[in-house]
Image (cartoon, helix red, strand yellow):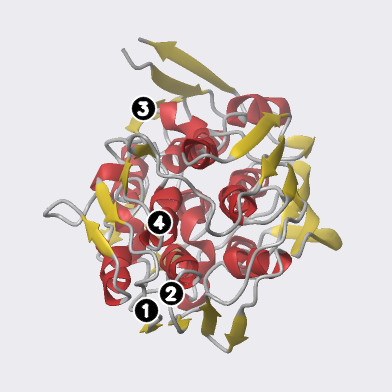
Amino acid sequence: MSKTVTFIVQPGGSLNGSARVPGDKSISHRSIMLGSLAEGITHVKGFLQAEDALATLQAFRDMGVRIEGPKDGELTIYGVGKHGLNAPQKPLYLGNSGTSMRLLSGLLAGQAFDSELTGDKSLSGRPMRRVTEPLAKMGAEIETTEKGTAPLKIKGQAGKLRGIDYEMPMASAQVKSCLLLAGMYAEGITSVTEPAPTRDHTERMLTGFSYPVEKQGSKVSISAKGSLTANDIDVPSDISSAAFFLVGASIAPDSDIILRHVGINPTRTGVIDILRLMGAKIEVLNERIVGGEPVADLHVVSSPLTGIDIPEALVPLAIDEFPVLFVAAACAQGQTRLSGAEELRVKESDRIQVMADGLQILGIDAQPTADGMIIQGGTLGAGRVISHGDHRIAMAFSIAGLKASGPIVIEDCENVNTSFPEFVSLATNLGLKLISEQAS
């Protein structure tokens, strides 16, 4: 029997102290993928030891890559080279990780063997045509369900993929990364043009592994002419995990925290920009470059927030942080309006509907729209909300407890382990009145 986890948050309190949140999930995934395909030995520090990133690690072990660790966030990858992967003996199970499935579909399309990608119930409901359709234009053969979802059955097309010039219909770092990884195995040049900037960790890391990538404006290009050279990686803390405490310290009176070694890649800092527009006091200290990625310490003190119309240009730069930004909006004075975020409806849950439902239960006027939400700031009450197995929803409603008038009970929180297993201990150490109850 799987365990069910319920969070119970007592109202009030403030956040104080300093913390280093776990390593960036996006960079942890990519360190395994590129380290495995590199020539030589890659050492990784700060790796996120959570279920999503560990699913990627296991997939590459299943394809014959020797990986030692992780122990205390450190691991050693003995790269097999670009053409050194072996056929897995069974389907590759990727749990809840959409990043793993979408990026691996591109990587595996050009291999000399067949493979199958499976996931949990949530991942098996997420749309995969956004990667399988452009991959098919490159000559890939990938079979999905009738709905375009996993399992993905991939017939390896080694030597048969062709480069394409693809204009993405929506801004998606996963689609871009998938096609770039496929392009490493395709004849000619593969170019991807994005309608708005998305996270560029794949391009940065390919460059760090000495693989040639060309960037011109919003277009990124790659070819099969290149190899990866092993490189050591120090994974920055995940700004998506830091976001819960950026919001928490902003809304809870008398809060004052420092979050150390946070990745501030400009394609990921939308959450800081949005919170500052709302009036949050966030200082960026000690900026530095680590392994090609900008990192800094973030100092946050409590501050009254005001509702805003969220600029659409910032939406792709904060797409994973909206559940907790909706909590900030609920605590702000006036109205906050989000549009241009239809992508939120196909995440681990329909994050627009699920957050609107939960905020309404807690007494907030939150009206979902096709591509966003309109939230009137108010007073958060007590209540019981359901996270629908979505880790970011569960953590967002936990943070809401800081400003609630009574206890908040959050059901279905077991998937917090997919991205942030230390959330409960770190949050309580900073001052959140949270307990986690487990029942089988």
SS for callout 4: helix
Nearer the observer: mark 1 or 3; the answer is 1
**Res 35 seen here:** yes
Residue at position x 61%, y 83% in the image: 214
Q: Earlier in the sequence, mark 4 or mark 1?
A: 4
Mark 2 vs mark 4, CA separation in Å: 12 Å
Give the residue number, with chain letter if any, for mark 3: 412
Residue at position x 48%, y 55% in the image: 320
Nearer the observer: mark 3 or 4; the answer is 4
**307 w.r.t. 408: above or below:** below
Q: Which residue is at the front of the view, 225 or 130?
A: 225
Q: Disc 1 residue type? A: Arg
Q: Earlier in the sequence, mark 2 or mark 3?
A: 2
Give the left or right position of residue 174, taking residue 332 as reference.
Answer: left
Residue 162's mark? 1
User: Outermost residue, bottom direction?
Assistant: 216
Give the residue number, with chain letter if any, for mark 4: 108
Mark 1 vs mark 2, CA separation in Å: 5 Å
